[in-house]
Image: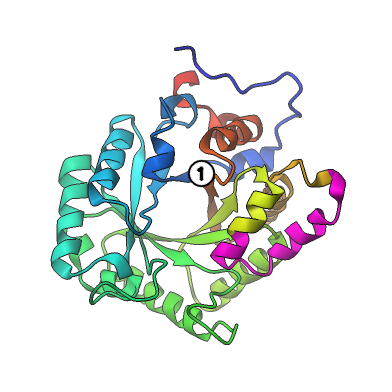
Amino acid sequence: MSILNFSSNNVSEINPALEAFLKNFSIEVMPRTASKIENFKELLPQNTRVYVAHIEGTPINEMIDTAKRLTDEGYNVMPHFPARIIESKEVLVNWIDRYKNEAGVKDALLLAGGVNQPYGEFHSSMDLLDTGEFDKAGFKNLHVAGHPEGNMDIDTDGKTKNVDSAISWKQEFSQKTDANMAITTQFCFESGPVIEWADRMASMGIDIPIHIGVAGPAKLQTMIKFSMACGVGASLRVLKRRAKDVTKLLLPFKPDQFLTELAEYKALNPNFLITNVHFFPLGGIKTNAKWTIENGGISATPALQS
């Protein structure tokens, strides 16, 4: 099969700040979406971190198989460990062991998970970290969730007391673990609130690197649907403003402005806590890859083209 070619003579010149900001970006897949991609090497740079989302009801065997396939293709796989769907410590240890020994996984994203009633004893990522099982297994990178716009499931009053407390706990944990830690956020659309939040984290004494969540190109209606489902509040204003312009309703919403503004802020403020970009490919993995290739320069050259 021929290599997919997303390059175009009409593509505008690469923005150096954006190219630098996209270095070592990551992307999220599910077993179902990953199965539609014949060869990730046609789409992503070698060693790209690929998160594998664990949606409630997905059999662990499908997760392991997807992780192994991606590892075998040369990618750094980071499966989700959603605390509330893990029935017991025995199940957690089993998952860790299987990911490590069957799929070569050494990284994990720990999060609460999107279910109201926990299956067992774990309620949050802190509960998972507190077991010490990831360190015992020698995991190298442990990521936790961040919420630039807050989280109504955690702070029902719309404030940030509980999410701030959780981040402070994770900051303390980062000093004790042998793993490298990072904060991976929900997807956002507006740079101003994100910059303000990241700088506020730094003022709280947080020094864990932040990987900012970004929605890949998708139809506006798709963006709004996912934003409402995921509780992305403040940034939804950006989408609603765009929706008022009927000429833009059928055009894909792209992250150009959002990421360029963050990239330029990072260029002027090297100590800015946001170090990496994490894509949620809401419009599809190939569509997302097309955008990164057209805008990321050498930071996004697919493995088969490097």
Residue at 43 percent of width and 26 percent of height: 41
- Residue at image location 56% in from the left, 34% down from the top: 289
* Residue occupying the point 21% across, 68% down: 87
Mark 1, Cα crowd under 10 Å, few <14 / some 14-19 / many 20+, is: many
Taking the magenta stretch, the answer to whether it contains residue 236 is: yes
Residue 206 in magenta stretch:
no
Q: In the shown orientation, is residue 14 left or right of residue 293?
A: right
Residue 9, compared with residue 162, is above or below; it is above
Relative to 100, say whether 92 is above or below. below
Image position, residue 104 (x, y; %): 22, 41
Is residue 98 or residue 258 the one in the foreground? 98
Residue 3 in view (yes/no): yes
294 horizontally vs 117: left or right: right
Check the picture and name the quadrant holding the N terminus. top left
The residue tagged 1 is 25
Residue found farthest to the front: 57
Position in image of residue 37 (x %, y %): 43, 30
Question: Residue 197: x and y, percent?
Answer: 61, 71
**What's under tag 1, amino acid-wise?**
Phe
Q: Is residue 267 left or right of residue 204?
A: right
* Residue 247 placement (x, y as % from top left): 86, 44
Q: Quadrant of residue 118?
A: bottom left
Closer-to-camera residue (257/141): 257
Residue at the location (58% across, 87% down)? Answer: 157
> Which of the pair 265/2 is nearer the observer?
2
| Range covered by the magenta-colored residues | 227-247
**Residue 270 visible in rendering:** no
In terms of secondary structure, what is the magenta stretch mainly? helix
Q: Name the secondary structure under disc 1.
A: loop
In this rendering, the answer to whether 234 lies above or below 67 is below
Q: Is residue 95 left or right of residue 124?
A: left
Q: Nearer the viewer, residue 68 or 294?
A: 68
